[in-house]
Image: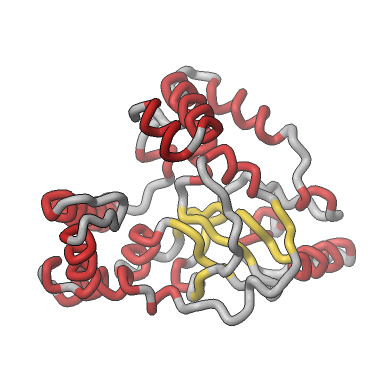
Amino acid sequence: MNPITTARTHGLPFLWYSLTDQVHSSIAVLPKYRTIAAKYYRRKQRPVDTYEIPMQPLERRFVDPQRITHVSEFPKHGYPTKNRMDQLGRVVSGKWDTETPRFDSQPLVQSLRQRFNDGVAWKQTPYVKDVTTAVENDEMAWHNCQTVSDIEQRCEFVDQLYEQIRTQGYQTQAEITIQTSYPRELTNEVLVDIGRNGQLLFINGQHRLAIAKILELETIPVTVMVRHTNWMETLAAEYQRGDVRTHPDVGHLEA
């Protein structure tokens, strides 16, 4: 990371949070880092904590990837990592969970299916064709690819990711590498929102979720960012009556 370029492109707050995260990552190998970091971030009360139900907003949920069928329309998830951490445990009303697009209709997801189900060469998939056109017009696309060579390297990375998950199983961010900050352990997982009726709505981690679906994995870890107000009101009312529904968001309460 070039500090001057980062500051000019994203602003000083982004640079500060990025540098702080780098410090976190460098000390993540220390024995008590995660215990201390977890206590630090859990000390803050979040909107979800105001409901009379112990939701544990910083704990991962494990879900069947096939249950994540639509994309969240909530507009303000935030970036960089610090801003995303601030979103965890938010409770928001509104219509952001209605008329949501299907995950499988996303251009990248369709091309990933062509690649790994049908063996189509990357260059022949519609998504890579569009990305190639973009970079040839001096535009950045697909994780900041700027050249055809960048696109080819990106394709190789996704092939390796698919093969890694296929042969080694799906790993949490903490299992992939110990040298990652506690915030990134949470916000680099597949991210979802939860709508008013408990629907799991995709936010981020498109490659991993699509691959998990293609491989028909039973469960993957996800981090929940925003929950709909109606969902929390329903859960809290049921919990107070002594009922706990079967849903990954409250699986930790069933025991």
Occupied quadrant, residue 116: bottom left
Horizontal arrangement in the rendering, residue 185 relative to residue 106 (left or right): right
Residue ranking furthest to the bottom: 99
| Quarter placement of the C terminus | bottom right
Is residue 160 visible in the rendered image? The answer is no
Is residue 146 placed above or below 5 in the rendered structure? below
Residue ranking furthest to the right: 241
| Quarter placement of the N terminus | top left
Residue at image location 32% in from the left, 70% down from the top: 109
Q: Position of residue 244 (x, y in %)?
A: 75, 65
Q: Position of residue 60 (x, y in %)?
A: 56, 49
Residue at image location 38% in from the left, 27% down from the top: 4
Camera-side residue: 111 or 182? Answer: 111
Picture colour scheme: secondary structure
Is residue 133 placed above or below 225 in the rendered structure? below
Is residue 145 visible in the rendered image? The answer is yes
Is residue 88 placed above or below 114 in the rendered structure? above
Residue at image location 40% in from the left, 39% down from the top: 175
Q: Position of residue 254 (x, y in %)?
A: 70, 59
Horizontal arrangement in the rendering, residue 187 relative to residue 1 (left or right): right
Residue at image location 26% in from the left, 57% down from the top: 139
Q: How many marks?
A: 0
Q: Position of residue 19 (x, y in %)?
A: 47, 25
Is residue 207 placed above or below 40 in the rendered structure? below
Horizontal arrangement in the rendering, residue 66 relative to residue 207 (left or right): right
Horizontal arrangement in the rendering, residue 225 relative to residue 110 (left or right): right
